[in-house]
């Protein structure tokens, strides 16, 4: 191996093949390898390429141990930068006379070590092994032809013709059958380190004893890596009224604003919530005020499932809230309104993240 201007040029000669014939299996074609990598590219070394071919062929076809007279030609591998910065690999094969047998290109982006490693180890190695295997079959046919001619010249009984030309091929191959190459699995897109978060949800909730409620919320905030900070506006409109003895019809609603501090791990989200607002009594008679203070500290756990990669999410969350100074109104032993403690809510909605 020698280095020339940042490129790697490998010339493996078969001049001393006669001295190491016993190390190669019968009918083992030997070849030369010219492997060049342009400056600035990170690719497998020539030793890696030889090792991968030797692993498939069960012997080193580029070592100086080829069978005498079995030299099949030279493989030329040139790695360079193609159009628009793509990685370009050209593989060609020349027979001993210098005639080009085949010439093929492989192109991949981006021009990284991983791309070059994939093209060389998966495609270049496969084409080299395929050509060496074909050369092995040609040598087997030539050996059978020479043997038949030699026996005919010496006066020996002429063997019967084979059923077909395929009968002269070796019965056992030095490598398993080649399988269709499978593409690398797609790499999941990486989450942007900083993003704006905007979402909305609907909430079946229990926030007052004996009352059901159905709320809506709108959230806006920002995420930095695995943590996010947001604000949420939450409203529960009145769902009809209830008749209370000696009081009359009563209805309630709730409006509040919350501060959310959340941590994210995969699809899982966990938040601490501080919520404050007002209970409203649109129908309250003369016993209840028009509104009352509402405050709560809450824990929220949920899941955010990606609908489109790292942009739109379907979310589901559960809130467990502990009220602060819960509203409680009782008259003549009859509870007119009592805030639930703790209160529970189930949220379902959509969220979008806008990378910054």
Image (cartoon, rainbow, N blue to C red):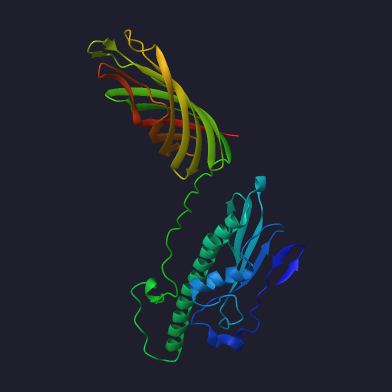
Q: Position of residue 215 (x, y in %)?
A: 37, 23
Residue at 41% across, 91% down = 155
Which residue is most to the left?
Answer: 245
Q: Is residue 176 shown left or right of residue 191?
A: left
Tell me if residue 15 can be seen: yes
Which residue is most to the front?
Answer: 332
Q: Position of residue 291 (x, y in %)?
A: 41, 14
Q: Quadrant of residue 144?
A: bottom left
Please state which of residues 46 and 10 is positioned toward the viewer in this rendering.
Answer: 46
Q: Is residue 56 above or below residue 196?
A: below
Q: Where is residue 344 in the image (x, y as percent from the top left)?
A: 35, 32
Q: Where is residue 44 in the image (x, y as percent from the top left)?
A: 61, 64
Locate the N terminus by quadrant. bottom right
Count of number-bearing discs:
0
Please state which of residues 61 and 38 is positioned toward the viewer in this rendering.
Answer: 38
Q: Is residue 221 shown left or right of residue 169?
A: right
Tell me if residue 95 can be seen: no
Locate the C terminus by quadrant. top right
Please state which of residues 10 and 141 is positioned toward the viewer in this rendering.
Answer: 10
Residue at 61% across, 83% down = 17
Q: Is residue 286 shown left or right of residue 258?
A: left
Q: Is residue 172 above or below residue 197?
A: below
Residue at 58% across, 41% down = 193
Q: In which quarter of the image is residue 15?
A: bottom right
């Amino acid at each position: 191996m020698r280095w020339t201007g940042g490129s790697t040029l490998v010339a493996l000669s078969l001049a001393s093949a006669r001295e190491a014939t016993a190390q190669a299996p019968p009918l083992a074609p030997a070849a030369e390898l010219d492997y060049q990598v342009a400056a600035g590219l990170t690719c497998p070394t020539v030793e890696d390429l030889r090792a991968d071919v030797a692993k498939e062929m069960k012997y080193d076809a580029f070592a100086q141990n080829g069978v005498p007279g079995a030299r099949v030609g030279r493989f030329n591998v040139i790695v360079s930068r193609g159009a628009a910065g793509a990685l370009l690999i050209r593989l060609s094969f020349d027979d001993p006379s210098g005639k080009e047998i085949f010439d093929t290109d492989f192109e991949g982006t981006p021009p990284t070590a991983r791309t070059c490693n994939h093209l060389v180890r998966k495609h270049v190695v496969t084409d080299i092994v395929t050509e060496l295997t074909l050369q092995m079959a040609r040598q087997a046919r030539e050996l059978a032809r020479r043997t038949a001619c030699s026996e005919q010249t010496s006066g020996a009984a002429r063997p019967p013709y084979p059923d077909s030309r395929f009968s002269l091929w070796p019965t056992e191959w030095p490598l398993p059958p080649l399988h269709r190459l499978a593409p690398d699995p797609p790499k999941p897109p990486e989450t942007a380190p900083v993003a704006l978060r905007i979402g909305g949800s609907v909430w079946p909730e229990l926030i007052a004893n004996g009352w059901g409620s159905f709320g809506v919320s709108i959230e806006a905030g920002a995420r930095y890596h695995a943590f996010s900070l947001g604000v949420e506006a939450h409203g529960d409109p009145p769902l009809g009224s209830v008749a209370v003895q000696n009081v009359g019809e009563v209805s309630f609603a709730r409006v509040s604003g919350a501060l959310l501090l959340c941590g994210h791990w995969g699809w899982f989200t966990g938040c601490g919530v501080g919520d404050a607002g007002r209970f409203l009594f649109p129908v309250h008679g003369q016993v209840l005020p028009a509104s009352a203070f509402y405050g709560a500290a809450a824990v929220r756990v949920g899941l955010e499932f990606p609908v489109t990669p790292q942009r739109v999410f379907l979310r589901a969350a559960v809130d467990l809230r502990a009220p602060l100074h819960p509203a409680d109104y009782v008259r003549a032993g009859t509870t007119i309104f009592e805030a639930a403690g703790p209160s529970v809510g189930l949220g379902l909605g959509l969220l979008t993240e806008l990378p910054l």
